[in-house]
Image (spheres, rainbow, N blue to C red):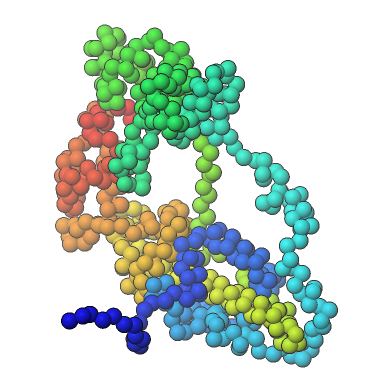
């Protein structure tokens, strides 16, 4: 029997989750810090002429009563937004009462454009050009901005760039009279140095994002440098070695090394200690150096203990990361997004939103929409689109602030003992605990705590600090892993020099204190805190 194929149309009813533009925008705003959010708002104000900032004198004046704040001063809870579950049917109330402000959605666009009183609709055709002049990119404005030191067009800001490690080495290489191929190989070697000044790279087999934790770093060979330049390693290996030896004489001392041993040897020779026992210690007794085995070094070197200690002090004074002093990384400034403080015997939450502009829709454009003639249909369409975009932004910002407040308030209620007593009273908490508490999706909580910091009585802490697992104590209550790590750190800091506590001994002490923990778990926590093992701590000075 022959098979036949044919095309046909058949209706099908299905449900699927579709992210509206408003939801997409709200999701993008959730992980932003307050400073990043302020930049986004300012950029939108530049691109959207309908957005304007409420003047300070209007903000400080008496405001009509609204439902945007609860009885406890928190943002209104009648409008919630869950990035994964969608927006609720209720409309978010306005944070700053103003016409067509926070909370309007697309079905309410017409309500936001209701006719104004007659005395406000007398917009003449001659005012149209005046109305849209702020949309035009005026070159004169940009020219004036060059004299403003805070402007991105400022000449001072363009020239105030720091010289990084590679630029510093390139200047030295170009001032050195070297043959062409050696110079080319030297430039390639410099470009392959990491920020610490080492000629090494991450092991391709390591899939971790933080390679400094996994430790899988391998040297970059000179043959790989030659291959990357399209050169035959057999023919140009000598030139590559010459180029590397030249770079290792540059400032800062120690650059161009492939491991710590070579880095220390370069610095010893650079500072004139090339023929001393310090070189012997680094070359042949690196393990004893790491463990600071003074007795063993005295025995193998045949030197007095006082002299060996002097050489050890010299080696320990060298820089294991010579390139870090010229790192081009910009400093990172942390501005708390949330303020947590005690007021009238209770811990309260306050959003640090002073840097956020208070937005509203321009009344001039509303006048234009209500007063224009039919010939202005194209301009009206433009203004309506911009108004819809402005309403989406105002609503998204409002929902983001409400979500951040709810998450911070839930954290405060669950970790009140921590704010009073410190890390020892920190309770284990996961994202689902807060998500269930505020009736939102777990991924929404994950997004809102990303990159956020809180100013607390215990210092400025990232919101992610409060989310961690725990262990069951003998009393049946869970103990925070962060609190256990702090106990391990305190025990190691208080241990007797020369007799460090082993992981098993630390586990026994914690068990006596009511927290049963395996030795391998102690070792895991110790490694996460980057604390050496007991054998490596033995003999080290405090």
Q: Position of residue 51 (x, y in %)?
A: 65, 72
User: Could you say which is closer to the camera, residue 485 or residue 25?
Assistant: 25
Q: In the displayed structure, would residue 156 be above or below residue 218?
A: below
Residue shown at 77% from the left, 69% from the top: 133
Residue shown at 73% from the left, 88% from the top: 374
Q: Residue furthest front?
A: 2
Image quarter of the C terminus:
top left
Q: Position of residue 90 (x, y in %)?
A: 47, 84
User: Could you say which is closer to the camera, residue 516 or residue 449?
Assistant: 449
Q: In the displayed structure, would residue 174 be above or below residue 526?
A: above
Q: In the displayed structure, would residue 289 be above or below residue 336?
A: above
Image quarter of the N terminus:
bottom left
Residue 97: name its quadrant: bottom right
Q: Position of residue 528 (x, y in %)?
A: 30, 44
Whether residue 189 is visible here, answered yes or no, is: yes
Residue 450 placement, left or right of 144: left
Residue shown at 84% from the left, 79% from the top: 126
Residue 6 placement, left or right of 105: left
Residue 93 placement, left or right of 494: right
Q: In the displayed structure, would residue 354 be above or below residue 537?
A: below
């Amino acid at each position: 029997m022959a098979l036949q194929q044919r095309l046909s149309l058949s209706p099908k009813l299905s449900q699927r989750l579709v992210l509206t533009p408003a939801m997409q925008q709200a999701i993008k705003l959730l992980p932003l810090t307050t400073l990043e959010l302020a930049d986004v708002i300012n950029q939108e104000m530049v691109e959207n002429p309908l957005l304007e900032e409420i003047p300070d004198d209007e903000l400080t004046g008496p405001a009509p009563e609204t439902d945007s704040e609860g009885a406890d001063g928190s943002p209104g809870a009648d409008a919630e937004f869950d990035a994964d579950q969608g927006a609720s049917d209720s409309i978010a109330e306005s944070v700053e009462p103003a016409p067509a402000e926070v909370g309007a959605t697309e079905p309410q666009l017409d309500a936001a454009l209701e006719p104004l009183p007659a005395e406000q609709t007398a917009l003449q055709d001659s005012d149209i050009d005046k109305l849209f002049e702020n949309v035009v990119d005026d070159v004169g404005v940009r020219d004036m901005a060059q004299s403003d030191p805070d402007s991105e067009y400022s000449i001072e800001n363009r020239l105030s760039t720091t010289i990084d490690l590679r630029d510093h080495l390139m200047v030295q290489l170009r001032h050195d009279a070297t043959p062409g191929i050696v110079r080319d190989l030297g430039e390639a070697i410099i470009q392959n140095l990491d920020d610490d000044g080492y000629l090494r790279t991450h092991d391709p087999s390591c899939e971790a994002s933080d390679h400094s934790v996994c430790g899988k770093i391998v040297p970059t060979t000179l043959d790989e440098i030659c291959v990357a330049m399209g050169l035959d390693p057999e023919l140009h290996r000598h030139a590559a070695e010459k180029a590397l030896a030249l770079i290792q004489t540059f400032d800062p001392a120690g650059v161009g090394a492939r491991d710590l041993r070579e880095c220390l040897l370069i610095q010893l020779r650079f500072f004139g200690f090339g023929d001393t026992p310090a070189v012997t210690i680094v070359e042949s007794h690196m393990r004893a150096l790491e463990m600071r085995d003074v007795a063993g070094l005295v025995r193998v070197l045949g030197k007095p203990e006082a002299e060996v200690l002097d050489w050890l002090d010299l080696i320990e004074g060298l820089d294991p990361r010579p390139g870090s002093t010229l790192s081009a990384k910009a400093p990172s400034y942390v501005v708390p997004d949330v303020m947590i403080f005690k007021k009238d015997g209770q811990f309260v939450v306050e959003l640090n939103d002073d840097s956020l502009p208070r937005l509203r829709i321009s009344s001039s454009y509303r006048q234009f929409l209500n007063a224009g003639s039919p010939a202005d249909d194209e301009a009206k369409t433009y203004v309506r689109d911009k108004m819809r975009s402005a309403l989406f932004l105002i609503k998204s910002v409002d929902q983001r602030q409400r979500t951040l407040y709810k998450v911070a308030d839930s954290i405060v209620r669950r970790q009140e003992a921590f704010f009073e007593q410190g890390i020892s009273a920190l309770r284990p908490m996961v994202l689902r605990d807060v998500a269930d508490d505020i009736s939102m999706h777990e991924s929404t909580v994950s997004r809102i705590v990303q990159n956020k910091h809180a100013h607390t009585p215990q210092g400025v802490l990232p919101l992610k600090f409060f989310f961690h697992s725990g262990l069951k104590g003998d009393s049946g209550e869970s103990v925070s892993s962060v609190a256990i790590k702090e106990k391990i750190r305190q025990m190691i800091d208080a241990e007797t020099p020369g007799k460090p506590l082993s992981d098993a001994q630390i586990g026994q002490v914690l068990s006596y204190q009511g927290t049963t923990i395996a030795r391998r778990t102690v070792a895991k926590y110790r490694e996460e805190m980057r604390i050496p093992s007991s054998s490596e701590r033995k003999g080290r000075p405090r």
